Amino acid sequence: MRSAILQRGHLCNPEDLESRIVRSKNTLSRSVPKTPNTFRIAWLGVPPTDHRSHAAGFATRTRTNLQSLERVRDAGGEVHVVTQLINSLLGVVVFPWERTVTEGFDQTPLSALVLQGWPAWKTFGKESKTLGQLVENLRHSIAHGNIRFSSNSRVPAEVTVYVANFPISGPSTWEAEIQADELRQFVLKLILHIEQTYEGTS
């Protein structure tokens, strides 16, 4: 004689329980769209054409938030611009990276960008020769919270930002630093680059 299973305070035959599980799985599979790359947006109810969902649109809003906070600071408000700069990196590095928008950045040498007025990051370890390589390293650093600051000053020019990448075990494989005021320039130039290159395409 088969043993019974206690389910919510009642005895349940194992065969009946298995049948219920199968029916439940079948119902779930019918209710979830299976179209690749689209079911999550449909499931969330977010229209794919929403400008905020695009990397360029998200970057534009990131700049708006940063500049709004700076105006509040200039008016004497109690805000943290350096912290907002790190938040901005989520919008111009992590978000575009996850959308594969940054794949084309590998064709952009950092040396050429510096000549165009982009600030230069001071890096150690694994070399970053292109914008794509720099963004990749920044993405990993930011996503894993490997960020440090030289001080608690609210003046960007008085703060150096340090980032690093670490393997599962062992020392860092890549480190970089930049002053927060130069990080602001980098963020704004990267936003403009994303807007000009990918507006409405991702």
Image: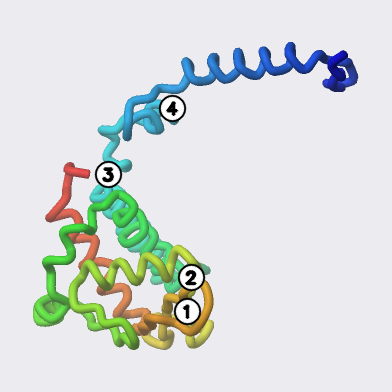
> Does label 1 or label 2 sit earlier along the sequence?
2
Which is nearer the eye, 3 or 109? 3
Q: Which residue is mark 3?
A: 54
Query: Badge 3, how many Cα within 10 Å: few under 14, some, many 20+?
Result: many
Q: Residue at x 37, y 81 (%)?
A: 174
- Seen in the picture, residue 61 relative to 167 is either above or below; the reply is above
Distance Cα–Cα, label 3 vs label 1: 31 Å
Amino acid type, label 4: Trp
Q: Label 2 crowding class (10 Å Cα cut-off): few <14, some 14-19, many 20+? A: some
Which comes sooner in the sequence, label 1 or label 4?
Answer: 4
Classify mark 3: helix, strand or loop. Answer: loop
Q: Are marks 3 and 1 in contact (CB under 8 Å)?
A: no
Measure the alpha-carbon separation of dots 4 and 3: 18 Å
x 73%, y 14%: residue: 15
In which quadrant of the rendered image does the C terminus lie?
Answer: top left
Disc 1: which residue: 154
Q: Earlier in the sequence, mark 3 or mark 1?
A: 3
Report which residue position mark 4 lands on.
43
- Within the image, what quadrant is residue 89 found in? bottom left
Q: Residue at x 13, y 74 (%)?
A: 109
